[in-house]
Each structure stands twice: as C-alpha cells, then as structure tokens.
Image: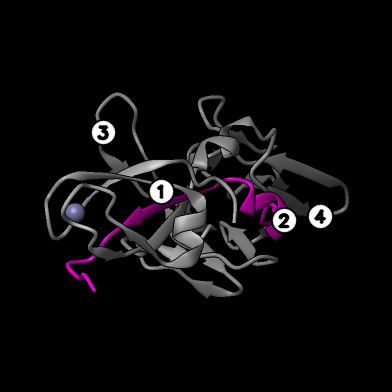
Amino acid sequence: MGGFKTTLITCQQCGRRIMVRAADVERGFITCSHTGCGAVNVLETTGYYDEGFLHDLDSLGQLTYQGDSIRTYSLQFGSNVIGIASSCTVQVERSVHNGRCFISRRHCTLTVTFDKWTGLLRYQLQDGAVDPATQVMHHSKNGIQLNGVTLAKAELIDVPDGGIITLGGLDQFRLNHVSISPDALITHKVETVFNPDQTQ
Ligand SMILES: [Zn+2]
C-alpha cells in the first residue's frame, strides 16, 4: 500500500492531538503520548485513488471503426461527443451508404469517469449531445445501439470493454477501455487514517 503520510488524529480519551506514523497504522492502534492519558486509540484506514495521473495519459481508451479500413479514435477524460461535425471531441469520418450518411453531426456522447474508491474507469453512453451554445440535449437522427440493442433517448448505459457501438444503424465502432495495471494503480493510492470512537 503506498502513499500513507504522517498525520494527526484526535485522542478519543483526552481530546489532544496525536501524531500517527505508518508503523502505527500497520499495528492498528496508537498509545496516546500525552501526560496522564496513555489511552490506546484504535486506528482504521480508508483509501482512495488520486485521479490526477489520468489527465497525463495520452488516451483514455479508443474507438475502432469496424469497416473496410481500420480507423481508430482516442478518447479523453470526461465527455466525448462523437459525430461528423468538427465541434465533436471525436470527429469520425462521414460514411456514405447508397449516397447517404446516417451519422449525425453530433451523434452521441461517451463519458469517461473514474471511481476513486474502486479505481475503476467507467464508460457511459447516451444518444445525442448537449449543444454547447444552448446547453440543450439534441438526440441523433438515426439512433444508437450497444451490442445490437437500441438505446432509448434518455438512457445512459455502461459500455463494457470490447462493446460495439452502432451509429445510425450501420456504422460500428468497438470500444477498448484504457488498461491500467494494478501495479501502476496502487502507486496512486492515497491512504488516510482515522480513529473510530473507541479506546482500550
Ligand atoms: Zn490521550
């Protein structure tokens, strides 16, 4: 477990501050050092992952077009608007079928978030995109599907690694989550200590 720094807790018996070091946390308790107290304070830890390192990654996963030519598009942290307009985070190429393109200008939104408690990334998809000028949600003209199932207009759905997103019924993209090894993740864990209301 990485990241624990010296911290102060409040003694549950005398109310004065006690300095806690990593060794105390490992032991699971600390004896109050203040004169006349000497209470044994139970220590518990909680931890979370600092998401800062995600902002330094070049890509937070990618979409690969499942067509004749292999085209890949990188995703960024937060909201990714996908469509053929230049205002999109992920501007995909126009794809013409019998003279028509079925992908809307701003077709759908794929939002990448990080759960700091579990260290897991989440990829959530919804039909349409918010207009940056009016903040109003506009849905796509021809809809989206995840693994062949059509999404309702207001639906927000988790996309698994390898999930196939279909835009407008014809153009398919495979999502690959970014892969972060447990060893790399643990270096971003921040441990905090607290003393529950309990002395021995
Ligand atoms: Zn004390």
Q: From mark 1 to mark 3, how far is it between C-alphas?
A: 12 Å
Q: Write down the residue under mark 4.
A: 67
Q: Write down the residue under mark 3.
A: 135
Q: Is mark 1 within 8 Å of ligand 1?
A: no
Q: Secondary structure at mark 4?
A: loop
Q: Write down the residue under mark 2.
A: 183
On the image, the x and y values in percent for residue 60 come to: 64, 44
99 shown above or below 127: above
Q: Write down the residue under mark 1.
A: 128
Q: Residue furthest right?
A: 69
Nearer to us of marks 3 and 4 is: 3
Asked whether the beta carbons under mark 1 and mark 3 sit within 8 Å of each other, the answer is: no
Q: Which residues are magenta?
A: 176-200
Asked whether the beta carbons under mark 2 and mark 4 sit within 8 Å of each other, the answer is: no
On the image, the x and y values in percent for residue 189 come to: 54, 50
Q: From mark 1 to mark 2, how far is it between C-alphas?
A: 37 Å
